[in-house]
Image: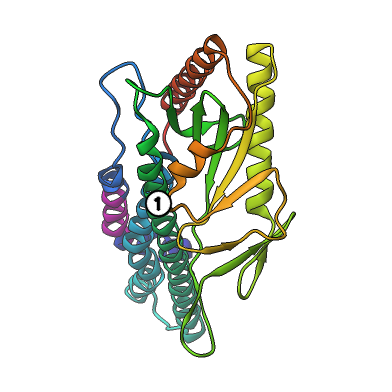
């Protein structure tokens, strides 16, 4: 029967399918997430980026391991077909080769995408850790009522850092950008801040300022609903490694390079918080982080 000529070669694909199953089973080895043994969730600097980096490494592993298996499958099937047919159809073999070539190109593009994503996430994580280390200098529970929260979840996005002080709340967003190279081979590291955009040496960006304003507005409205009184919230955008020109900047957002960030925040006083409101804000942020973490853990991993 003619249909057997197409069905029997599938036998040669079973070992490759078994190898693919083993690769999928080993994917869990790239899950580097750790959970706190206590009720409080682990919220360290760059926690959200660590999860995204973990997923990126998992994707790189899958594409790198499954790519050769899937790409060779048409050729293996074609060689199996040669054992069961009496007349060779070179057009059919050319189609098998073309399909394998297209699969190789597709997986190569996926690997390039994963590589670029990992590079961006590593740079972002390095900047997050540097800013978190600078903010940790604010925390002196015995002398000053300063508290720093990392990766605070909102309804649709994550705030990098939230600093609670007696003089107001600071929403700190971090953006990592690779410095440009000038025509003379030297680094260009100056960025001009305008009201609605950042002017880098070779490009402009609006989203970092928009995201910082969005985060500050969300936190201000959320705290006002929970506390029943207006809460002073100031947005801070950190661009580690850049020289900041704020001559044309708006006054609602502070854009800094991150050096001496803790001292800059100590000098800012957007408002005053009473002790009960100050303590309630800390409780609300800790409770939200705990509830969102429990919600995340209850969702099945993909």
Residue at 30%, 49% (x, y): give it.
Answer: 21
Q: Quadrant for the C terminus, please.
A: top left
Residue at 51%, 33% (x, y): give it.
Answer: 162
Q: Would residue 242 appear left or right of 69 to someone viewing this image?
A: right
- Mark yes or no: residue 168 visible: yes
Q: Is residue 212 magenta?
A: no
- Mark yes or no: residue 160 visible: no
In the structure shown, which secondary structural element does the residue marked by tag 1 occupy? helix
Tell me where residue 118 sits by quadrant: bottom left
- Which of 53 and 198 lies nearest the eye of the viewer? 198
* Residue ID for mark 1: 125
Residue at 42%, 82% (x, y): give it.
Answer: 87
Q: Residue furthest bottom?
A: 184
Residue at 66%, 27% (x, y): give it.
Answer: 220
Tell me where residue 44 sits by quadrant: top left
- The residue segment tinted magenta is 13-23
């Amino acid at each position: 029967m003619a249909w057997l000529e197409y069905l029997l070669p599938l036998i040669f694909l079973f070992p490759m399918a078994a190898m693919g199953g083993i690769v999928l089973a080993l994917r869990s080895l790239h899950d580097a997430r750790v959970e706190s043994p206590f009720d409080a969730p682990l919220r360290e600097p760059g926690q959200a980026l660590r999860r995204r980096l973990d997923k990126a490494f998992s994707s790189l592993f899958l594409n790198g391991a499954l790519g050769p298996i899937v790409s060779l499958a048409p050729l293996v099937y074609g060689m199996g077909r040669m054992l069961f047919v009496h007349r060779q159809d070179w057009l059919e073999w050319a189609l098998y080769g073309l399909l394998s070539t297209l699969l190789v190109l597709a997986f190569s593009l996926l690997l390039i995408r994963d590589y670029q994503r990992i590079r961006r996430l590593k740079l972002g994580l390095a900047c997050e850790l540097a800013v978190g280390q600078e903010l940790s200098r604010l925390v002196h529970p015995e002398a000053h009522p300063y508290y720093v929260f990392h990766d605070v979840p909102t309804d649709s996005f994550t705030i990098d850092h939230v600093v609670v002080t007696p003089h107001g709340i600071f929403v700190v967003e971090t953006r990592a950008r690779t410095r440009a190279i000038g025509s003379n081979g030297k680094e260009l590291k100056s960025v001009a801040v305008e009201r609605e955009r950042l002017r880098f040496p070779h490009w402009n960006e609006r989203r970092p300022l928009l995201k910082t304003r969005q985060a500050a507005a969300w936190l201000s409205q959320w705290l006002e609903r929970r506390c029943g009184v207006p809460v002073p919230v100031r947005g801070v955008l950190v661009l580690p490694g850049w020289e900041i020109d704020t001559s044309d900047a708006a006054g609602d957002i502070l854009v800094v390079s991150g050096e001496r960030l803790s001292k800059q925040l100590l000098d800012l006083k957007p408002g005053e918080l009473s002790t009960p409101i100050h303590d309630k804000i800390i409780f609300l942020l800790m409770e939200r982080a705990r509830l969102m973490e429990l919600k995340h853990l209850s969702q099945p991993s993909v």
